[in-house]
Image (cartoon, rainbow, N blue to C red):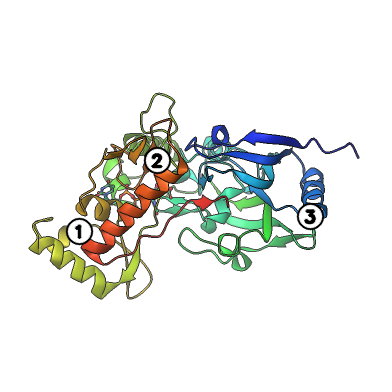
Amino acid sequence: MTALAIQREVPLAPLTTLELGGPAKHFIRAEDEQTLVAALRWAAERELRSTILAGGSNVIVPDRGYDGLVIHMKIGGLDFYEGGAVQVGAGVPWEAVVDGAVSRGWAGLECLTGIPGSTGATPIQNVGAYGQEVAEVIEHVRVLHRDTLSFDTWKPEECGFSYRGSRFKRDPDRFVVCAVCFALRPGGPGTVRYAELENALPPGASLTEIRRAVLELRRRKSMVLDPNDPNRRSAGSFFLNPVVPVAVADRIAEQAAREGLVARPADCPRFAAEPGLVKLAAGWLIEKAGIAKGTRRGAVGVSSNHALCLVHHGGGTTAELLAFAEEIQARVEARFGVILEREPQFLA
Ligand code: EPU
């Protein structure tokens, strides 16, 4: 085998959508599983930490950088099989998968358009938007165990999917997602489940129409990567939408009505969750805690189009971003007694 092309002191900020953070002490691109395994072994032999960086759209890099080996996931391969199976390498840009599915008339991913990042990341945070989640269409995930360097194929039950979560996310640094196989529905109807999307579409809309409507909604919220958008440097939603007992949601709704934040308690946005629980809208809580869209703290702030997106305006630091995130968490907790949990992963 040829020697591994390990580079040193590689800046990571340009490889992330936030454009923040320091360099990787060691860095390698892995375009195939063989390189990935060799790179992990190389790091282990030197007692160096190692981590995987993929599309960089859901990651926060500390200002000091990463003192181990960063493996840039670039494993390719995108194959569509008769019957609706799609086999995708972890490094394939996600939009290529959505594009291939929608253009073939295969249902299951049409609402997941406009999401930056690569395919391997989608099972990790169980990517979801506008009423769809990848967990609904994942057939299996090809997984590398980092301790034994052996491969496995996991059915969805083994992936432990939850709202924006999975076994991969809950137990970081143990597994690498190398490929994902999706089971889509050729000729099937699209998913129009999200009220905002339903309002924007005629009944019986095609997959192409659904995709176009989702892209339009996302664009309005600065959630489609656009080099001309001043809110473009972000990691999507910075916090999870808190899932709370119904009694807590009711208490907040009554408080909001009492304080004049909404006309009636029923005007507080809330979404169905498991029985007895309600998902609140973190963006709404942030705004109502007094952090308006477009608020800035030096080089960082919240998006002028969506309070749940923290943005970097250029020339800032990760420390500034995290300090602002803490300020938001403290204000929401003080006002509503709800703790917001960070969503993007921290490369530490
Ligand atoms: N809202 C506000 N102010 C804001 C933003 C939102 O009041 O600044 C209210 C909206 O009016 C709405 C509610 O909050 O009633 C929900 O807003 P939105 O439809 O924009 O969705 P979200 O809950 O903020 C979630 C996902 C997004 C996904 C959208 C659409 C999470 C953490 N985020 O956002 O996913 O695109 O739904 O399905 O679940 C991501 O995870 O990075 C992400 C972008």
Distance between the alpha carbons at the discs numbered 3 and 2: 46 Å
Residue with the most extreme top position? 228
Residue 201 image offset from top left, x and y in percent: 31, 41
Q: Which residue carries the number 3 mark?
A: 44
Task: Report crowding for label 1: few under 14, some 14 to 19, many 20 or more residues within 10 A (C-alpha).
Answer: many
Whether tag 1 and tag 2 are in contact, CB under 8 A, the answer is: no
- Tell whether 207 sits left or right of 79: left
Q: For residue 210, which numbered disc appears in the image?
A: 2
**Does 206 sit left or right of 203 as displayed?**
right
Badge 3 local density, few (<14 within 10 Å), some, or many (20+)?
A: some
In front: mark 1 or mark 3?
Answer: 3
Residue 272 visible somewhere in the drawing: yes
219 to 279, vertically: above or below: above
Q: Is mark 1 on a helix, strand or loop?
A: loop
Q: Which is nearer the N-term, disc 1 or disc 2?
A: 2
Disc 1/disc 2 C-alpha distance (Å): 26 Å
Lateral position of residue 256 relative to residue 46, left or right: left
Q: Which amino acid type is marked by label 3?
A: Ala
Mark 1–mark 3 Cα distance, whole angstroms, equals 51 Å
N-terminal of the pair, mark 3 or mark 2, is 3
> Mark 1 = which residue?
268
- Please report the residue visible at 68 percent of the width from the left and 54 percent of the height from the top: 176
Which image quarter holds the N terminus? Answer: top right
- Quarter-of-image position of residue 293: top left
Other-residue count near label 2 (Cα within 10 Å), few / some / many at <14 / 14–19 / ≥20: many
Residue in view at x 51 percent, y 38 percent: 102
Q: Mark on residue 258? A: none
Tell me the SS state at disc 2: helix
